[in-house]
Amino acid sequence: MEHHDIDPYTLPRDKQAIYINEPWLVDKTLLELPIHPEPEEEKDNIRVYVPLDINKEAILRRLDRVIVQYGEANEYNESEFSVDVDRLVSQVEIYDQIWSIRYVPEEGKHSAEAVELVKEFVERLRDIPDGCAECFPFETIDELSREYLDQR
């Protein structure tokens, strides 16, 4: 799993905003370019921080929307389906990272909140109809299970 580039502002323990300097989580076209977290150097560039609420309900709602959008996982949509779900996995990682920073887990390397979220996330991935996709969602299920569920 990945640790995300959280801007070096003091992490507030209240409900203030936290800045994640990973614009490719919002703009999928940036996935096609070398990852460069700094603002683009175009003369007309304006860096905009878009609010994104990251909580259990929102992440699962977004996952449900992606699953409805693609339907079954098959050889034709497997790559795009996987990219969209991986963006949500990044949100899970950020959710876990912030919970862990704010409330150090008593045991294990992941927050209890993230472990519970991943259980539901994996259940939904397992329910995706299999239209003969080769890798997705199987590799994502295995990776999440290994990282979050096999630790306790």
Image (spheres, rainbow, N blue to C red):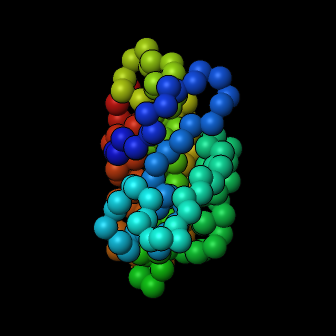
Residue 64, image x, y percentages: 65, 59
Q: Quadrant of residue 38?
A: bottom left
Residue 134, image x, y percentages: 35, 74
Depicted 65 relative to depicted 112: above or below: below
Viewport quadrant of the C terminus? top left
**Quick one: which residue is furthest to the front in this view?**
43
Residue 148, image x, y percentages: 40, 37
| Left or right of residue 75, residue 146 in this image | left
Q: Quadrant of residue 16?
A: top right
Which residue is painted at 44% across and 39% down in the image? 6
**Quick one: which residue is furthest to the top in this view?**
106
| Left or right of residue 56, residue 22 in this image | left
Residue 102, image x, y percentages: 51, 22
Which residue is painted at 52% across and 54% down in the image? 88
**Looking at the image, which is closer to me, 30 or 139?**
30
**Does residue 99 show up?**
yes
Depicted 67 relative to depicted 119: above or below: below
**Does residue 112 show up?**
no
Tally of numbered discs: 0
Which residue is painted at 43% across and 65% down in the image? 40
**Looking at the image, which is closer to me, 28 or 70?**
28
Viewport quadrant of the N terminus? top left
Depicted 50 relative to depicted 111: above or below: below
Which residue is painted at 35% across and 35% down in the image? 150
